[in-house]
Amino acid sequence: MKHEVDPATALARHPFFAALDADVLDVVVRRAVLRLYEKGAFIYVEGESSPGLYIVVSGTVRLFRTSEDGREQDLFHTSASESLNDASAFDGKPTIASAQAIEPSVILLISAEALATLMRDYHQIGAAVVRAMAGRLRDLARLAGDLSLRRVISRMAGTLLRLAGPRAVADLPTRNELAAMVGTVREVATRTLRQLEDAGAIRLEGRSASILDRAELERLSGDRWPGTS
């Protein structure tokens, strides 16, 4: 597995460390351990004891929870300069979700002890942590609202709009991954896509969905999305 690895650059773009100068960033890098993960490898599993904070240097990692019946619900995906396991890194409790590399990934691990020392020695880090955690809380609250208040077709419409952004085509993950993002099972996700296609809102073409009627997807999702007038 080959990577162009630049931990300092990844840290400098992370909200916890963006305000630090180069000398302090170097201190943080020297306190961290670099780990490499193949596609499909687990960084950690829900309920495990937590060694600290993970920063993605390269690659993409999905965070998800698993129900008793085996259903997976994606919480979010993280990529370069984003972090994993924030809550457990600070409170020392077991991980609240599983983390899996969905492509070859390089991860920087900062132990909980090292993180506590850094926050004590550099007050800018502690202030930045508060702001970033507030933003993450808002994201999770929005996801919880989506799952509790919207039907599957509404959540699917919103997910397609998020995947497409301002473009007219949404690149789709696997059906299992898409189902987890929407909060349902593969069969229901597939049926819902077909319902949207039959309604003329999208056209399915392999691993992509062309947005034919953005206004209808917005109406179903209950929101307006980037690229709209």
Image (cartoon, grey):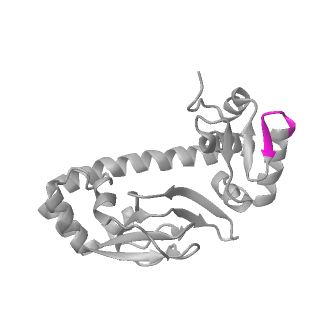
Query: Is 203 on the left-hand or right-hand side of 43?
Result: right
Going 52% across and 70% down the picture, which residue do you hit?
Answer: 104
Is 34 above or below relative to 11?
A: below
Q: Position of residue 98 (x, y in %)?
A: 52, 69
- Considering the image in quadrants, where does the C terminus appear? top right
Kindly tell me whether residue 44 is visible in this rendering.
Answer: no
Furthest residue in direction top, as rendered: 229
Going 76% across and 32% down the picture, which residue do you hit?
Answer: 212
Q: Position of residue 218 (x, y in %)?
A: 67, 31
Going 63% across and 54% down the picture, which residue do you hit?
Answer: 181
Magenta segment range? 198-204
Q: Position of residue 97 (x, y in %)?
A: 51, 67
Q: Position of residue 23 (x, y in %)?
A: 14, 61
Is 20 above or below relative to 225?
A: below
Q: Quadrant of the rendered structure where residue 179 is?
A: bottom right
Q: Quadrant of the rendered structure where residue 3 is?
A: bottom left
Going 42% across and 73% down the picture, which residue do you hit?
Answer: 94
Query: Is 61 on the left-hand or right-hand side of 7?
Result: right
Q: Quadrant of the rendered structure where residue 176 is?
A: bottom right
Query: Is 106 on the left-hand or right-hand side of 198?
Result: left
